[in-house]
Amino acid sequence: MRAVVAILALAVLASTAHADPDPKRKVCVLEYRSGSSALPGVAKRLIDEMAKQTSLQLLGPDQARTVYGDQLDQAVVKCAGDAECIAQIGRKIGVAEVVLVGISELGDVILTMQRIDANAKTVVTRVADSLAAKATPSEDQINGYLTRLLAPGDFVRYGVIDIVANLAGASVTVGGENRGLTPIQPLKLHAPATYTIRVEKTDYVPFTTKVALPPDGEIKVEAELSKRGAGSAWYQRWYVLAGAGLLVAGAAGTAIYFGTRDEASDRVPVTIVIP
Amino acid sequence: MGTVRPASCLVACLLVGACDGGAAGSLELTLSLPSQPDLRPTGMTTVTLTATAPGESPVGTTTELSAGSVSAGDLPIGEGIQIGIVLRDVSNRIVGVGEAGQAVDIVGDQATKLSIPVRRPFVYAASGTALYSFDPTLDPRDAKFQGKLEGVTGPQFTVSVGGDRLAVISGNQVQVVVTATNTVMGSIAVPATVTDAAAVPGTHKLAIAHSGGIAIVDLDAGTAQNVAVGAVDRITVGPGGDGAMVAYGLVGRVLPPEKPSMLATCTGTSKIVAVAVDAPMTAVPAPATAGISDLAASPDVPMLYATLPCTGKVAKIGGVIEGGAVTLTDVADLERAAVLTVAGDRVWAAGTKMSTPACSTNCTATTPVACPQPAGNHLAYVTEGAHIILKSIPLDGGMPVTLDVPGRRETMVDKGDMARQHAQVLKALGVVPLDLVTLPGGQYVALVTKSRYYIEELSDSFQVILPCLDATTGDWALIDMASSSVAQRVRTSCTVIVGPGAFFDMWECDTPPDGERNMMPTQYQPTSIGALFGSR
């Protein structure tokens, strides 16, 4: 018995580093019980937490059974934890990975979790823990298992902010970072997070807003920039505009000349040199 | 490549007839990295450049790195711009940080060149006898994750000064370490025993609190100007109302009790003294209406904050400090508020969620907590363990963010059990944050703490079966505020006092998990913490 515990203690620490896989891949969670009724619903708890914390496309045992057929449980038992065999089930279900949750009892309840790459037919990570009889893992423990089981990149989630302005050439700043001039492509950003968006252009009242971006969500921000003092200013009267138009038209050639020369600007390009 | 001038400018130019093209402006930043492999940032794939103009929100760009030089977008022109650099690896982990030593003017028609020291974001913990380093860019199981800085003696405080210098303060001297090589370049004597130190933003100067007052130390000139204002316990530096830098000293620091309020009282009042950095003169400390455990000034705007351990608050300090009385305006609740700092546009403070004790008869402020176990009323155990609380409070008065750091349990194992399965798992009676520092970027906060664990003895009618256990641990932790999790943690020490005469009488602290173990030859209790380019 003591030898078994020692082996398990080592198994808890075992993990293999791999490149981060697609954070939106299909993953199936299967449960395998070796004559134990302990930890009821533990696979569902894992799935629920994975759904909450990642963007993985998840299939639980019930959904997997629908795809694979009623023989799924027998097939899992027959595999007896063999990675290649489980991977074959995963491929048949059409997932990239299978998380196999095993529950057995050796005095304590032994909970094992293996993440198996269906195509590579190998175990990517393996986590095991021993729990006192009748104990249930806390939420923190479940989170701890998942942190070790899944790739770090699985917990990085994104959302999309699509900023549309009524003007071209307005400067867009999101979360303090300059994102270029309008029109801009939709921005893929870390989520959940709150971003301050600022759209500004000289002579226009800046548009500022704050948006809470949910994971896998898309938010469209329509920025309406209005001219400073628009509506009643003296310079909007027809004779002023006409006069200014003549002045501008008469000076157009000079304006183009000055406007296209290399010259002092309100921004400067930045170059970073790493020796 | 020509640029098109905005129309409004064109019209204005035409009207005044005074447009002059001139040369195009540019900013070239050369990152100065250490040559030693253990100190040089590695694995970076992106660089984030931030520029902060006085009184403005930072603007930034993130660019993928390639060999040689890269174009990093553009920045608005302006004066007194503070430039910062953050290098990240492919997993978005910070692997290098840098900051220009002084603010720079970005001019629209001039080429500006700037060299920025960039370092790994080392965190340093001082124990009074040695200075230990943690490299958060490495996996905690990496052999070089924990280290010890050689060549410094008796370090009590560590302060990053411009990133290229590290001031290590011990006794009555300041040792200056060059961070490019981690070698000591010299030392400067201060008049009395140092109690705290803070960097003067944008300079190579330090404000030192000591048992006789405040000293302003110039690392470049090797000088120390002393002002005798009486013993000062903590110090911070920030701009005053006129923009000139002021060193604020805390007199009569009130420490948060280690034990919960049912077992300890928290009383006292403190004073604050202000000394101009450029023209230090004797000043009279102003009384505050509450006990203060720590002070922190914003490096950019005239704002000063304090932690009030007895009332459980973080407060903004106002009123007249010189010869007057200060006012305390609560900005956030924080039980057993202990330490704080200001970084960017936020206050970062640490306190403690107190434990819930159970005593043999009833718990009072005089109930003993000791091993050997006293006769009569005594602490039995705690039903809810203590844990650290971190608060991030916006300077503009926005909603604070609270992070309850998961409480730690310590396992005491029976050395007589060969399988090491006979164990007692103890919840913390108290956890005291001793010091905190924020890493550049504000994502990570590093803490050093001291914790105490206690359980009474277990007896049957015949004998004591299990002894009372009274354990004390020292810990270093790196908290990731983005994911609200403990990113790294090292238990630097654990000692246990075992009560006598028990049937099972051989107990020791269990070994922490891999990556949380102290890899140094001896145990140590860190008492202060600092980080390169960090805010403390």
Image (spheres, rainbow, N blue to C red):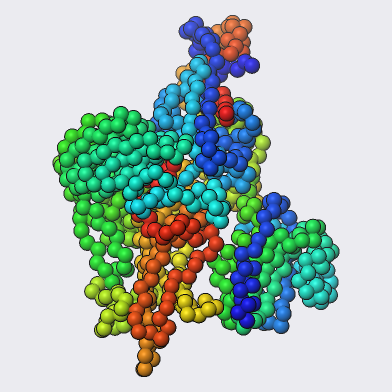
Residue at the (24%, 53%) spot, across then down: B253
In the picture, measured across the screen, residue B386 lies left or right of residue A2, that is: left
Q: Position of residue B114 (x, y in %)?
A: 48, 25
Residue at the (53%, 59%) spot, across then down: B515
Residue A36 visible in the picture: yes
Q: Position of residue B271 (x, y in %)?
A: 20, 49
Q: Nearer the viewer, residue A185 or B165?
A: B165
In the picture, measured across the screen, residue A219 lies left or right of residue B80, that is: right
Q: From what the image shows, is residue B219 above or below residue A66?
A: above
Q: From what the image shows, is residue A229 above or below residue B227?
A: above
Residue A220 visible in the picture: no
Q: From what the image shows, is residue B304 above or below residue A233?
A: below
Quadrant, the N terminus of chain B: top right
Q: How many tags in the picture?
A: 0
Q: Quadrant of residue A42?
A: bottom right
Residue at the (60%, 60%) spot, across then down: A147
Q: Position of residue B136 (x, y in %)?
A: 51, 49
Q: Nearer the viewer, residue A53 or B374?
A: B374
Residue at the (61%, 74%) spot, across then down: A6
Quadrant, the C terminus of chain B: top left
Q: Position of residue A239 (x, y in %)?
A: 52, 12
Q: Nearer the viewer, residue A208 or B294?
A: B294
Q: Nearer the viewer, residue B513 or A171?
A: B513
